[in-house]
Image (spheres, grey):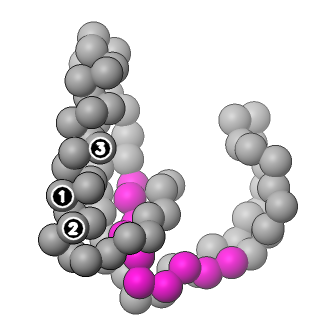
Amino acid sequence: MRILSIHADTLWYRVTRKTKMAEPITVREDEMKECVVLFSCVERLDERNPPYVIGNARDSILKRLDQLNVNRVMIF
């Protein structure tokens, strides 16, 4: 799994269209202040041991959040 994290003062977003995998939309436009934005992708190799990959990603993300003293996350 690859994860790019960006520490942002403000993140603004707007939902433009529905996808097959999306949850029901209640808020179409919003912003998040003082957060970490995570862009992630899963690779074929990750399919061999999903629990390990998920646990490793979780630990890395929590460590990063602790270093930055941030408790809000936006995942793309």
Q: Disc 2 marks which amino acid?
A: Asp
- Looking at the image, residue 50 lies above or below residue 33: above
Whole-number angstrom distance, CA of label 3 to CA of label 2: 12 Å
- Magenta segment's dominant SS is strand
Q: Which residues are magenta?
A: 30-39
The answer to whether residue 47 of the structure is visible from this angle is yes
Instruction: Give coordinates of residue 23: x percent, y percent.
Output: 74, 44
Q: Residue at x 18, y 58 (%)?
A: 63
47 or 68: which is nearer to us? 68
Q: Which residue was labeled with disc 2?
A: 66
Which numbered marker is on residue 63?
A: 1
Up/down of 24 relative to 35, above or below: above
Seen from this angle, which residue lies furthest bottom?
9
Q: Secondary structure at mark 2?
A: helix
Residue 44 location, quadrant? top left
- Residue at image point 32% right, 32% down: 54
**Helix, strand or loop status at disc 1:** helix
Rendered location of residue 11, percent (x, y): 51, 80
Relative to residue 69, is residue 47 drawn left or right?
A: right
Of 71 and 60, which appears nearest the observer? 71
The disc label shown at residue 58, or none: 3
Split into 4 quadrants, where in the image is the N terminus? Answer: top left
The picture places residue 19, in percent across and down from the top left corner, at 74, 42
